[in-house]
Image (cartoon, grey):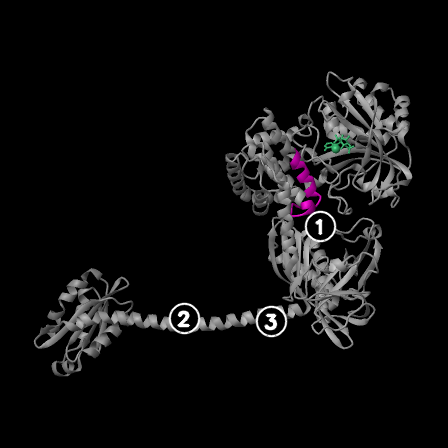
Amino acid sequence: MTSQEIRQQFLDFFKSKEHKIVQSAPVVPFDDPTLLFTNAGMNQFKDVFLGHGSREYKRAADTQKCIRVSGKHNDLEEVGHDTYHHTFFEMLGNWSFGDYYKAEAIEWAWELLTEVWKLPKERLWATVYKDDDEAFELWKTKTDINPKHILKFGEKDNFWEMGETGPCGPCSEIHINVSDDFDNPSFVNAGVPECIEIWNLVFIQYNRDETGKLHELPAKHVDTGMGFERVCAVMQKKSSNYDTDVFTPLINEVSKLSNVKYGKEEDRIPMRVIADHIRALTFAIADGAVPGNDGRGYVLRRILRRAARYGRKLHLKDPFLYKLVDVLAKTMGDVFPEIKEKKDYVKKVIKAEEESFNATLDRGIELFDNVVKKLQKQNIKVIPGEDVFKLYDTFGFPVDLTNVMAREIGLAIDEDGFNKLMNEQKERSRNVHIMPGTGQLKITGYAPEIFVSKSGEKTEFTGYNELKTKAKVTSNKSDSDFEYVILDKSPFYVEAGGQIDDTGELVINNNVLPVVDVLKVDNKTVHIVANDENKIIKPGIELIAKVDEKRRWDIMRNHSATHFLHRALRMVLGTHVQQAGSYVGPDRLRFDFSHYSKLSAEEIREIETIVNEQLRRNLPMIHHRDTPFEEAKKMGAIMFFGDKYGDKVNVVQFGDFTMEFCGGTHVKNSSEIGLFKIISEASIASGVRRIEAVTGAGVEKYIHSQLELVKQSEHRVEELLDVKKKLEKEIAELRVKEKLEQLDHILSIHSEEKGVFIHKGRVHADSMDELKSFGDELRSKIKSGVGVLIAQVDDKVGIVAIVSDDLIKQKNLSAGKIVGELAKLVGGGGGGRPHLATAGGKDVKKIPATLSKVENIVSSFI
Ligand code: ATP
Ligand code: MG
């Protein structure tokens, strides 16, 4: 039976039991910040179990895409080494929402496994929670399982929870023992490949809260999960999931790419890792996640790097993972069309990430090898934290990668040492930084925490409505540098969600104390002021807290514009665009987001146009404050990580254009933003782009600076043109000078015929005009005499002859006549006036002969 058929039979079976067949939820749960990846089929029904939400049906079944690489359910280390844990797998599930309960769940599971699929009953085992006698009895009475095959286990095995908090309850699992010793109870829950858990029936009846306490739920539910790949292996009588048709196309492709057979165990492990990881990567990326530096992105990056490194064991060095996406799309694209649709995008993302990893991998491995060599010489078994940190910090080696590499050669890593360095680095970057835009040094993480008591009123934030607030000091403290003041109310915004701190002052009886920094400690706003004149500050006194208004308005313009930009990006580039970080200051805004290629000039233009058109629409800001998370989600607000499930949240909406979860401060109407202009777009990490933009007065400033640049360049162009002209003139003069120098030689030598001096010679000339000007020049330099210059002009002969005035008068000599005779010798003709005449001819070869005849001809005229 093919895997396709198995999946379909499961769904058909529960359809026949009146279950609604539903879609798999995305494997990236963008609406549940407590979870990085969907880890069980029940995730999408969490709200139903908790009593927050409801569905139109009471029974459902589906196949759910799951990833278990983080949090409570993390199987990453197992993957590849065993044959039945995957990072990505499909979980077949059926649910009852306050409808049927344990009896039906057990009965139907047994029916499907033993009657429809005809699995051998003697190999099946059931486990129940140690206190769940009800389930124990039901297995005995509702099924014909061998009663000796019903076993009781404790919390670890038979109490199921999706995470640290949330719906949970006792469960009953079905295991299959495929070994020869299948009647032996010690195989169950022993973690051996011969006896694996295939199906878990969970009886959801509690909610675990943050403190760890269990609360009875209003109704009781059934939540089951069956490992699809495991069932395929059992049904297809394979001892490994990787031998089923779910994986063989991938394994074969890896084998083809690497030219390595899926034979020896040491080759099998990397092949299994690769075939597994490409599924997790493809499904996660198709659902909108992107490899990156933190959270979900970092987990993906780790998975990819792990796969890439295992590829090297098969001598796959160039990017290769992306090539497997086609195979996957072909084998699974019918069931999950999203991977077919997003195929090209997914390939691009994976390839880019592989390329950037490869660049650092080689150098990292070199460092690793060197470190190992050194340690081995000294017989040390633990890689120092410093080296682990360097591999992480400089070469992008995730710690667990280094750990795996170390383990493979029998070494360990100093994880504590690494963590210490990691924390130090975090400290360094946290403690001191220049406040963007102000140039002030921001000092955080010291004294105030000590005096801020956990109890007492929180500071009410008035900064959404006003920028000046009459407030009362609730507590204060000073040290040699600063005064730390906590107020009952304050309009000062403390850096959060990318929006930077407000600056301003506290005014006490006309004394102005500048606020150099603000901090949030336990819901209280600490104002750090420079109290140089030691003004009296004590609990109970009243003062006015004033935010720098102009600066704050600029910040609000930029913050609101960020929401418009985000929406426009999703319109122009696609909904895979996710915010990856932001900075909102008075001078500019910065928005980091997931996207794979450089934005074209047209795309940037289109984004600007959309934003500016929307800004001009006068869209009013609607502030939904303290809205329950669930309600905000229903309104359709875009949200990000950090918002806690169950929290009250603020939603900022501008007309019909944007709606986002946001705690920041905003303009009241879109037109207050003025104009929006993108000033830069760049890549900051693979798959993450950064846009910087300005609004309002910032645009004005930007235009001025651009105009200034234009002016400067105009000026520069003028200067350059001048220089050009001057140079051209100089060149022309130099050329003429160079050419006239040809005459020097001709002037210095002469022959004589009957008392007449003759100057003659061959010259280079570019035109007849030029040759004629040489004649002029020659004539002006000769007191008395005849001159003849011959040149090849293009492929013709040019001749110029001159006669000085005295010879014209006294000897009746004529340049015209001389030139006429010479021209005949070169097969041409010409003539002119007595003092200067030119002629042309065709026969270039005759130039030397003609020159030698000059004396004869002149002589014949004397
Ligand atoms: P195991 O003890 O084998 O890790 P589990 O107790 O973590 O399983 P559940 O959380 O009960 O499993 O999930 C329901 C079913 O999903 C399991 O019965 C199993 O068939 C399947 N499953 C769980 N984890 C994986 C995984 N990493 N890869 C493939 N299938 C899995
Ligand atoms: Mg598990």
Element at label 3:
helix
Indicate the position of residue 742 as horizontal and vertical percent values.
Answer: 22, 69
Badge 2: few (under 14), some or many (20 or more) residues near its Cα, within 10 Å? few
152, 840: nearer the viewer: 152
Q: Residue furthest left?
A: 754
Quarter residue 749 falls in: bottom left
Whether residue 665 is visible to the viewer of this picture, yes or no, is no
Whether residue 789 is visible to the viewer of this picture, yes or no, is yes
In which quadrant of this rendering is ligand 1 seen? Answer: top right
| Residue 547 falls left or right of residue 140 | left
- Mark 1–mark 3 Cα distance, whole angstroms, equals 35 Å
Indicate the position of residue 658 as horizontal and vertical percent values.
Answer: 76, 58
- Mark 2–mark 1 Cα distance, whole angstroms, equals 53 Å
Question: Going from the N terminus, do you reach mark 3 or mark 2 first?
Answer: 3
Mark 2 or 1, which is nearer the eye?
Answer: 1
Q: Which mark is residue 575?
A: 1
Prevailing secondary structure class for the magenta stretch in the rendered image:
helix
Q: Is residue 11 above or below residue 554?
A: above
Q: Is residue 291 magenta?
A: yes
Question: Going from the N terminus, do you reach mark 1 or mark 3 first?
Answer: 1
591, 536: nearer the viewer: 536
Element at label 2:
helix
Q: Which mark is residue 555?
A: none
Identify the residue position indicated by label 2 in the image: 724
Dot 2 and dot 1 residues touching (CB under 8 Å) = no
Question: Going from the N terminus, do you reach mark 2 or mark 1 first?
Answer: 1
Q: Amino acid at mark 2?
A: Lys
Quarter residue 671 falls in: bottom right
Indicate the position of residue 835 as horizontal and vertical percent values.
Answer: 20, 79
Identify the residue position indicated by label 3 in the image: 704
- Mark 3–mark 2 Cα distance, whole angstroms, equals 30 Å
Q: Which residues are magenta?
A: 276-297
